[in-house]
Image (cartoon, helix red, strand yellow):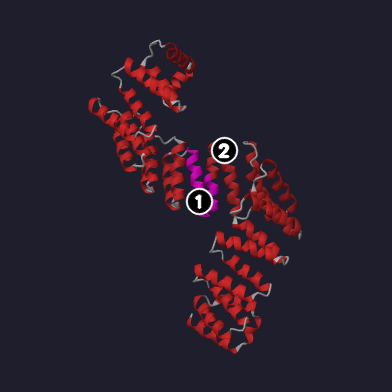
Amino acid sequence: MNDEFRWIEDGDINDLISRFEKMLGSQMHLFFDVNEFEALVDYFIDFQEFDKAEIAIESALQQHPSVSSFIIRKAKLQALNGKYYEALEELNQTELLEPASDELYISKAEIYSMMNKHELAIEQYNKAIPLSENPEDIYSVIAFEYENLNDYPNAIKNLKKALALKPESENIIHEIAFFFDITNREEEAIKFFKDFIDTNPYSKVGWFNLGIFYNQLELFEKAIEAYEYTLAIDDKFSSAYFNIANSLSGMQRYTEAIRYYKETFKYEAPEPITYYYIGESYEQINDLRNAMRYFNKALEISDSLADAWAGLGRVFIAQDNDITAINYYEKAVEIMPGNTEYKFDLAMIHMKNTNYETAISLFDKITKLDPYNIESWINQSACVFALEDVDGAIEIIEEAITTNKENALLWYRLAGYLHVSGKVQQAYFYIESALKLNHEQHTELLDLIPHLYSDTRFIELLGVYKDNG
C-alpha cells in the first residue's frame, strides 16, 4: 500500500469506502479528490476487489481526466488481470504525453517483472532512480530482479547502493547478508561488514551479521566478539545471546553455551529449538537427565520438532534402552521422512539388535534418497551378508559403485564378498583396484576377512601399492 493510502487509512478509510459504495448503489455522482480516489483504488487493488477498483478508476478519470496516476493504476489493474501488453500500451501512451515520473517507470518495471522479463524490468527501474525521492527502495527491488536472473553479484551491488543511501536500514543489511550467505561468500561478507562497521560502529545488525559469517567459517572466538559488540549496543538482542551459545557449542564449551541459551528467555518467550539446543548441550556433557528434560520441554511447545524426538532417542540409546529409543526415532522419521540422519540412526539400532530385515529396508530408503551415502550402502550389504545372502550383498555393492566409482571402501567390500563366495581371482582384481584408490583403507577388507593377513599374495600386494603410493 502506498503512503497516501496509509494517510487516508489513519483517518477514516471506512467512511471513504462507505461514500463510494453509496455512490454506486444510488447512481449518484459524488465528488472525490485525487488523494481520495487514489486511496480507494489502492485499497480495492490491495484487497483484490478488482471490479470495484475498475469502477473507481473510471470515475476518477471522469472527474480528474488530466491526472496520470489513474492511467498508471488502470495499467496496474490490467496487468493483474493478465493483460500485460494492454497495460504497457497504456503506460507507453502516457509516457509520450506526460513528463517522466518514477511512478510510471516503476509501474512498467513491475509489469515486465510479472512477465518474467527481468532485464527489461531492471531497465525501467534504473530510469526511475533519478526521479525518485526514495532511490534506495528501487535499488532493493532491482536486487531481487537480479536474484530472479541468478545474478547474485549484481544483486549485492545494488543492495550496497541502497545501503549507502540508507545505512540505518536493518532490512537492507539483512538482505545483503542473505545474498552473501546463499552464494557461500563468507570471506567477502566479513570484509564488507567490517568496512561497514568502520563507518557505522553502532549498527547492531552490522556486528550481528559479521558474527554470523565468522561463525560459518568456524572462527568462533571472533564470532563471539562480534556478538558481544551487538549486545553492547543492545543488551536485549536475544538472537545475539542465542548465536553466542551456538558459537560456544562449536568450541565444545557446552556449559557456557547452556547459560547463554537460557539468557534468551529474559527477552523473548522460549522457543522449542532453544530448548532442544539446551538439551543437546546437556547431552554433550553426559547430563542425560537434564538432556531428557529439555528435549521434553521442546516437545511441550511443539510436538512436531523431529530433532527433539531424535534427541530423546539418543538419550535412551546411551542408557542401553534400545526398544524405547526405536519408538522415539520412529516418531522423528514420521515427522521428517526425508531426513536420512534419523533413518540411519534407527537402522543402526535395528542392525545392532539383529533386526536385519528392518535395517535393510531403512538403509535402502536412505540410499534411494542419497545414493552417495557410503555408510548406508555398506551397512545394508552387511545386513544382507549377515542373513547369509552373499550374492545379494554383492549386488548391493555393485549398485553402490555405479554412483561412487572412486570410493575405495566399496571396492574393498566388493572384493571381500567375492572372496568369501569363492571367487578369489575376481576378488584380487578388485583388491588391486581398491589399493590404487586408497591404500590405507585396506583395513575395511581385513575387518571382513581377517585371515587375509596371513595370505602371502595379499601381503605382497600391500607392499607393492604402498611403495608405489
Percent from the top left, x then y, of residue 317?
72, 59
> Badge 1 local density, few (<14 within 10 Å), some, or many (20+)?
many
Q: Kindly state the secondary structure of the residue where label 2 is placed.
A: loop
Query: Is residue 73 shown in magenta?
Result: no
Residue at 55% from the left image edge and 36% from the top image edge: 234
Task: Locate residue 297: give its quadrant.
Answer: top right
For the residue pair 260 and 171, the one nearer the viewer reads as: 171
The residue segment tinted magenta is 202-226
Residue at 54% from the left image edge and 69% from the top image edge: 400
Name the amino acid type tagged 1.
Answer: Tyr
Image check: 388 left or right of 465? right
Height in image: 169 above or below 330? Answer: above
Marks 2/1: CA–CA distance: 18 Å
Residue at 51% from the left image edge and 47% from the top image edge: 211
Residue 237 - label: 2
Q: Kindly state the secondary structure of the residue where label 1 is placed.
A: helix
Percent from the top left, x then y, of residue 111?
35, 35
Q: Which residue is mark 1?
A: 214
Look at the magenta stretch and give its main secondary structure: helix
**Quick check: can you spot residue 176?**
yes
Name the amino acid type tagged 2.
Answer: Phe
Residue 158 - label: none
Image check: 434 left or right of 61? right
Height in image: 70 above or below 245? Answer: above
Height in image: 192 above or below 8? Answer: below
For the residue pair 220 and 290, the one nearer the viewer reads as: 290
Percent from the top left, x then y, of residue 179?
43, 46
- Extreme residue in the left direction: 96
> Badge 2 local density, few (<14 within 10 Å), some, or many (20+)?
some
